[in-house]
Image (cartoon, grey):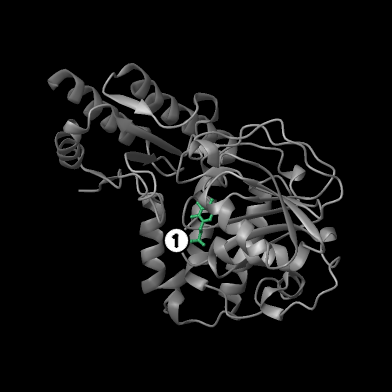
């Protein structure tokens, strides 16, 4: 039986996508060939790449606004350094909201001065800093929209004159934002867009070409743009499955419709966390992520019982990240509301039996 999959990433994708993706391994587009054995320069795959690039811009409402979409390799971790390589001339501003932003900061420091404008490290990254100033003399401002590990999410992005770069790995395509306020968005596919192996980069072309340093071809956004994201052999299968997931999203009403679903799922779980005395949420209420909900048991002695109960209910992947402990329910786009109901029922059964 299919599990209720709360895995933080790689994670659940729509069941239809798994089915269609598995068909393509056996016989892609009725070609008599597997998608795994055709040239990435073949017409069939070039069309996949083109549709994937166009559809990502369409879903984000960025068509015809000077943006290019790329499907690169090396994960979001590669973007930590690629962003700085391409954009950091002298100085950049970073917001530190946890592990992932800290890693981005570490890489950026190899290329120039990094001004950490605010950090939530003082309270173990359980909130989103607010009211900080972004200097006008920096090359860009970098933030992480959703803190996958600790479960916080930026609800209101700071306004600034400088280009805004955002790591949206764990909430891409999950909620409506004015994406044209961002100059570069990147997202490792394996949280909300597809399988591991490719990273979506959406970049406003006019912010490129400002730094003086020489950039190796594989790390140069302009090179990848000039080759339509096919400078080297792309991660063909990861791009294809990402395309299927984006098609699924579009067919189901796009980001507006999925956001409504995501809000419902999050509201259902957080209300149980709040009314059930056996649980407490980890993060500041106003900064709660609708993607990754983190919580703890109020009594450690209930751990074995609770763990047995949710596993018996067919739930997978509820353990918190090793750096936080407790529990983390990742409710990405493809997780159905029914799966959240199953978890909430287990939580209230625990209260009734305790
Ligand atoms: C998972 C994650 C990453 C790391 O992604 P990789 O593809 O493994 O490099 C970076 N940022 C955020 C916000 C993430 O959730």
Q: Residue at x 85, y 72 (%)?
A: 212
Q: Is residue 301 above or below residue 25?
A: above
Q: Residues within 10 Å of mark 1 (few under 14, many from 20)?
A: many
**Residue 267 shows in this picture:** yes
Horizontal side of 104 relative to 265 (left or right) equals right
Horizontal side of 147 relative to 216 (left or right) equals left
Q: Position of residue 300 (x, y in %)?
A: 22, 33
Residue 132, quarter of the rendered image: top right
Identify the residue at the far front of this view: 122
Q: Is residue 257 above or below residue 4?
A: above
**Residue 70 shows in this picture:** no
Distance from mark 1 CB to nearest ligand 1 atom below 8 Å: no
Horizontal side of 154 relative to 318 (left or right) equals right
State the residue in front, 104 or 119: 119
Q: Is residue 353 above or below residue 86?
A: above
Residue 226, quarter of the rendered image: bottom right
Q: Residue at x 39, y 21 (%)?
A: 271
State the residue in front, 306 or 311: 306
Q: Position of residue 161 (x, y in %)?
A: 85, 43
Residue 44, quarter of the rendered image: bottom right
Q: Residue at x 63, y 57 (%)?
A: 105
State the residue in front, 350 or 30: 350
Q: Which residue is mark 1?
A: 195
Q: Position of residue 249 (x, y in %)?
A: 52, 46
State the residue in front, 223 or 43: 223
Q: Secondary structure at mark 1?
A: loop
Labels in figure, total: 1
Horizontal side of 1 relative to 317 (left or right) equals left
Which quarter of the image is occupied by the C terminus?
top left
Q: Position of residue 204 (x, y in %)?
A: 78, 56
Q: Is residue 212 above or below residue 313?
A: below
């Amino acid at each position: 039986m299919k599990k209720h999959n709360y895995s933080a990433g790689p994670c659940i994708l729509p069941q239809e996508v798994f089915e269609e993706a598995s068909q393509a391994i056996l016989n892609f587009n009725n070609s008599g060939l597997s998608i795994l054995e055709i040239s990435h320069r073949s017409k069939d795959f070039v069309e996949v790449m083109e549709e994937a690039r166009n559809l990502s811009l369409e879903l984000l409402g960025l068509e015809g606004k000077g943006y290019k979409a790329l499907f690169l390799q090396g994960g979001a971790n590669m973007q930590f350094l690629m962003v700085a390589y391409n954009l950091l001339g002298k100085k950049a501003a970073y917001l530190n909201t946890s592990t992932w932003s800290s890693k981005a900061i570490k890489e950026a420091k190899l290329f120039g001065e990094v001004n950490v404008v605010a950090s939530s490290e003082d309270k173990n990254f359980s909130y989103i800093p607010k009211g900080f100033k972004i200097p006008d003399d920096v090359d860009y401002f970098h933030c992480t929209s959703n803190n996958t590990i600790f479960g916080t999410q930026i609800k209101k992005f700071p306004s600034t004159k400088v280009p805004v770069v955002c790591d949206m790995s764990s909430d891409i395509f999950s909620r409506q934002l004015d994406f044209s306020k961002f100059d570069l968005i990147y997202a490792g596919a394996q949280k909300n867009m597809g399988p591991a192996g490719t990273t979506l980069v959406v970049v406003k072309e006019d912010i490129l070409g400002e730094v003086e340093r020489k950039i190796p071809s594989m790390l140069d956004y302009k090179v990848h743009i000039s080759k339509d994201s096919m400078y080297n052999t792309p991660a063909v299968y990861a791009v294809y499955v990402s395309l299927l997931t984006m098609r699924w999203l579009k067919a189901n009403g796009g980001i507006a419709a999925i956001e409504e679903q995501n809000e419902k799922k999050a509201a259902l779980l957080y209300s149980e966390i709040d009314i059930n005395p056996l649980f407490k949420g980890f993060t500041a209420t106003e900064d709660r992520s609708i993607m990754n909900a983190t919580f703890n048991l109020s009594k450690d002695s209930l751990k074995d019982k609770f763990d047995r109960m949710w596993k018996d209910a067919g739930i997978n992947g509820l353990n918190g990240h090793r750096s936080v402990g407790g529990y983390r329910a990742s409710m990405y786009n493809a997780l159905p509301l029914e799966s959240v109901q199953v978890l909430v029922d287990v939580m209230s059964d625990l209260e009734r039996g305790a």
